[in-house]
Image (cartoon, rainbow, N blue to C red):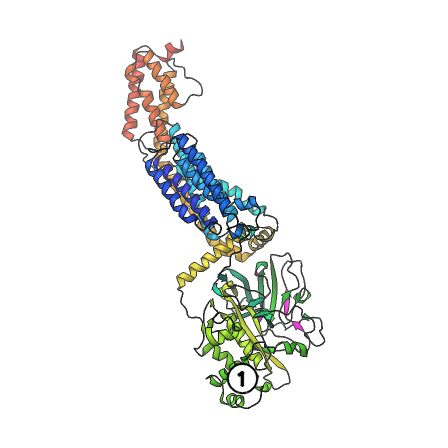
Amino acid sequence: MNLDRTARALHHLTLALAGVTLTLAELPFIPWLPFGLIVYLVLILVAHSLRGRFLLPEWAANLLAVLIATTAGIYIFLRSGADLWADDVPLPAALVPYLGPVLMALLCVRLFRPRSTDDFWLLQGLALLQVGLGCILASGTLFALALLLYLVVAGAALAAGERYRRGKRSAWVSGPPVLPTAWLPLGLRWVVGVALLAIPLFLLSPRSDQPDWDPLAGFGVRAQRKESRTGFSDELDLRRTGRLVPDETIAFTVQTRDGQGRRRDLLPADALFRGSVLDRYENSTWRVEATMTGIFAGDPKPEFLDLGSEAIEIRFLVPRRTHGLFLLDPLPLSSDKKRLPVRLIGETALKGPITQNVEVYPTPRPTAFLNLPGYRYAQYVKKDRSLDRTRAPRYRESYLLRLVRCPVPDLELLARGMLLASPFTTPELRQALQTNEPELPPRWWEAMARALKEHLARSGEFRYSLESQRSDLELDPTLDFLNNVRAGPCDRYASALALLLRSLGIPARIVKGYRGVERQREGEYIVRQSHAHAWVEALVPADDGSAEYDWLTLDPTPEAASSISDLARWLERTQSGGQEFFRELVVNYNARSRAAVLERLQSSDTWLYLSPWLVGAVLVLLALWLVRQRRRALVAPAIQGIQGLYGRLLTLLAARGWRAEPHGTPQELAQQARHWLRQHSMTAWEQLPIQLARLLYQVRYGRQRVAANELRLLAEQLDRLEADLRSQGLSASKSRA
C-alpha cells in the first residue's frame, strides 16, 4: 500500500477517528476502553511514521489475531454476570458491546501485517465496522460530533486515495504540481452528490413510530444517575438527591397579539406558565390528584369563556415531547361557571374549545396525548389582569381539607417561630401570633403567606442551588431542608412554603410549569426547559371585601447568583440545541418528526429565519465556482497549447504514412510514433512524441502550467521535423501514393 503523504495522513486519521467514535459509544458499557484507545492511537501513529519499514511475518500476525480472539472470549466468559447492563440481556445482544475492543485490536494487527494492494479498503472497512457498531450503542451528541468528523475525514481520505490512484495510472505525471492537487474538489463533489440524494430520501422515509431509541435501556443498563436535567413533570419526589443540569432545549413557543391581531411584546420577562398542580403530599412526594371528579360544587361541564374583542391573545405551540399543556398564570377563572378563555387553533384533527379534549381544573392537562406533533391553542387574558391573584371557584369541603393536610410533625411550631423572628412579619401579625389561638382566622392568611414567602426568598438564610442534598435521612426532606440544608432548587422552596402554610391551616398547593421567556422578535418568545419552575398557590380571602376567596401566587425561591458567563451560557445552549436536533431529526426521526418539519417549512417565519443562511450558502457556492473557474483559466491556455502541438504531431506523422493503433492512450500513441520515427532513421526526433505526451499528462492530470517559451520551442521543433520529413522524401503526396 503505497500512498502519497496527504493520502496516508488522511487514511490513518480516519482509522484513529473510528476508534474515538467507537470508544465514546462504548463508555457506558466498557468504562476502561479509553485506556485501550490510547494504545490504539499510539499504534496507528507508529504505523504512519514507520511507513511500512517494520512488518510482522504473516504467520505471526495470524497467530496474534487468534490470541486476541481467544483472550476476548475468556474475558467475556469471566465477566459474565459482573456487568449490570448484561444481566437481563440475551447472550447475543450481551456480546455486541464486547466486539468493539476486538475490532480495534484486529485493525492494529492488520496495520503491521505484510502489505497488499487491498490493504486500503480492508482497513477502511474495519474502521467502518467500528463506526457502525458505535451507531448501535450510542445516541448522544458527543458521539454525533465524532461521527460527523469521521465522515468528513473519511470522505477526504477516499478522495485523496482516488486522486493518488488516478495519478499512478497516469505514470508520466512527474514533479510537484504548480496548482493544488484536486482531491478535495473530487471529494466535495461526491459528498454533495451523495448528500443531495441521501438527505431527501432520509427525510421522506422516517422510521415507524416506535419509542425513542435509548441504547442504555435497550441493553439493560440500570445505572443510578446522580445528575438529572431540568424540565417539566407531574411529580415532585423530595427524596431524590443530585445535581440538576440546565437543559437549554426549547420547551414551547409563545406569540402575543393585541385586540387587533397585531403582534406586540406583551409578556414580562418573568412570566409564569402553569402546567400542573400538585396537591397531594404522601411519602415525601407531591403528586397530582388521580381524578378531578368531586372537586367542584355542582361539577358543571367546562365551557369557553369569551373575554371580548379587546382581550390579549396568547398563542402556544407545545411539542408533544414536552408532555404537558401550559397557560399564562394566574388563570382568570369564572366564579359562576367553570370556564376557561382557551381555544384550540391550527390545522389539526381537533376543533373548537380546548375544554372538549382537556381537563381544565385545577389546571389544563390532556385527557390523552393524541398522535399530533404538537398542540396549538390560544389563551385570552385581559389587559388589566392581576399578576399575583385570581378568583377561586367554589370547592367541595373534602377538597379543601386535602389542601390543609400536613403529615410533617412539628412544622407548625417551626412556621410560627419563623414568622415571629422574620423581619418581614408586620407588627400586627406578630401580635396576633403571640396569642394562644391554635389557628389564626382567614383574615390573617394572606399576611402570613406573604411573610413566609419573603422570608424564604429574601432573608439571606436560604440560598438557591441546583444541588439537591439531604443532611438527616431520618427527617422529612422538607423539615431537613428548613433546619439543616437551607439550599436547593425551586422545588425545595415550593414544598417548604406549601407545607408551612398547611401547618398553619392555610390551603396551599404547588404549581409546576415554567418561569421566564426569551424574546426572539416582536411578539414572539421561546420558553426553554431550563425555565422549568415550581411555585405555590395559597387560598386567601378576596381583597374586595366579599365572601369569596382568591388564589394567591407566591414564589419563594431566592434569586440565583449569576455564576456563568454569557459565552458559557451560549455554549451550553448551543450544545443543548445540538442534542435536540440530533435526537429529534436523526436518532428518533419518525412520522411525527417529519410532520413537524413539514409544518415548520410551511411557515413564512421559518423561511424568514432561514433566508440569511440560504443566501450565505448560495454566496459560498458561487465563490467556490469562481475559484474553480479561475483555476481552470490558469491551466486552460497550457492545455489548449499542448493539445494543439500534440495533435499537430499526430496529424503530421499520419500524413506521411504512420498508422496509429485505434483507441490508444496518448502514452501508447507516443511510443508507436517513436518506433515509426526510428524505423525511418529519424532518431534525432524520436524523443519528441514522448516529450509532448509527458507534457500533456502533466498539464491535463497534474494541473501543471507550461511556460509560453517552452511551447514556442516545441512548435519550432515541429517545424524542423516537418522540414526533415520533406527532405527525406516523406512527403504527404508520396505517402498517399
The picture places residue 571, in percent across and down from the top left corner, at 42, 58
Magenta residues: mostly which secondary structure? loop
Task: Say what amino acid the circle numbered 1 marks.
Answer: Ala
> Toward the viewer: 56 or 728?
56
> Toward the viewer: 139 or 648?
139
| Magenta region, residue range | 322-344
Q: Is residue 634 visible?
A: yes
**Residue assigned mark 1:** 447
The picture places residue 588, in percent across and down from the top left corner, at 56, 51
Q: Residue at x 39, y 28 (%)?
A: 169
Q: Quadrant of the N terminus?
A: top left
The answer to whether residue 393 is left or right of residue 425 is: right
Q: Residue furthest top?
A: 737
Q: Does 339 appear in magenta?
A: yes
Compared with 467, 503 (above or below) is: below
Q: Quadrant of the C terminus?
A: top left
